[in-house]
Image: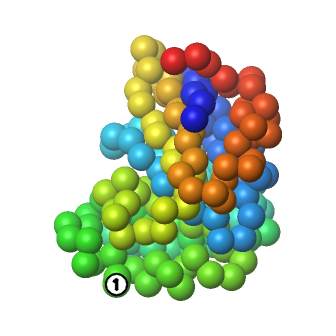
Amino acid sequence: MFNARTKSAEETQAVAACIAEFAIAKDLLLLVGDLGAGKTAFTQGFGKSLGVEEPITSPTFTLAKDYSGRLTLNHLDVYRIEDLEEVRDLALPELLEGETVTLIEWGDQIVPAIPQNYLEIRFEYGQEDNERIVTISSVGASWHGRMEELKEALSDWSIQK
């Protein structure tokens, strides 16, 4: 686990773009944080780095949206999910197959229903208006081997918390 600091939505997008460079097929990322903390901005930067050309917006009402790029980007928002049984309706196992990477906003709400192999990106408000503290941690083996390189790549934003 390590921490980064961003001071604008553009910096949050730059951090995401950097992380996207390490993404491989079947990766799962959980985006966690309060409303307005930067989850969708992160997804926009991540998608742009993957070569997504269409605008990325939060799928709060549709729950899921996919975008074409170097990898297919599955973008889910589970804020409105009230029961873990509803996760089945998302067909998550199918989304995690093939040449895809899946980002789930509010993903901490469905942890019991997902594979325990993901990268968690947690956003907290900083001291200043647009400042965010971004905590990056891996669960399971998938991201474990990439964490040191990822930490080095994000060193411009690195902080000690």
Residue beneath the point at 79% across and 35% down = 153
Give the camera-side residue of 41 and 99.
99
Q: How many marks?
A: 1
State the image quarter where residue 102 is shown. bottom right
Q: Position of residue 56 (x, y in %)?
A: 56, 61
In the picture, the quarter occupied by the N terminus is top right
* Residue 144 to residue 76: above or below: above
* Residue 105 to residue 158: above or below: below
Q: Position of residue 93 (x, y in %)?
A: 50, 81
Residue beneath the point at 57% across and 28% down = 3
Under mark 1, the amino acid is Asp
Mark 1, residues whose alpha carbon is within 10 Å: few (<14), some, or many (≥20)? few
Give the camera-side residue of 154 and 51.
154
Colour scheme in use? rainbow
Whether residue 137 is visible to the viewer of this picture, yes or no, is yes
Give the camera-side residue of 15 and 54.
15
140 lies left or right of 127: right
Whether residue 68 is visible to the viewer of this picture, yes or no, is no
* Residue 99 to residue 123: above or below: below
Residue annotated with mark 1: 89
Residue beneath the point at 64% across and 64% down = 27
* Residue 15 to residue 125: above or below: below
148 lies left or right of 13: right
* Label 1 SS: helix
Q: Position of residue 161 (x, y in %)?
A: 51, 18
Residue beneath the point at 74% across and 23% down = 156
Q: Position of residue 30 (x, y in %)?
A: 49, 54
Residue positioned most to the front: 141
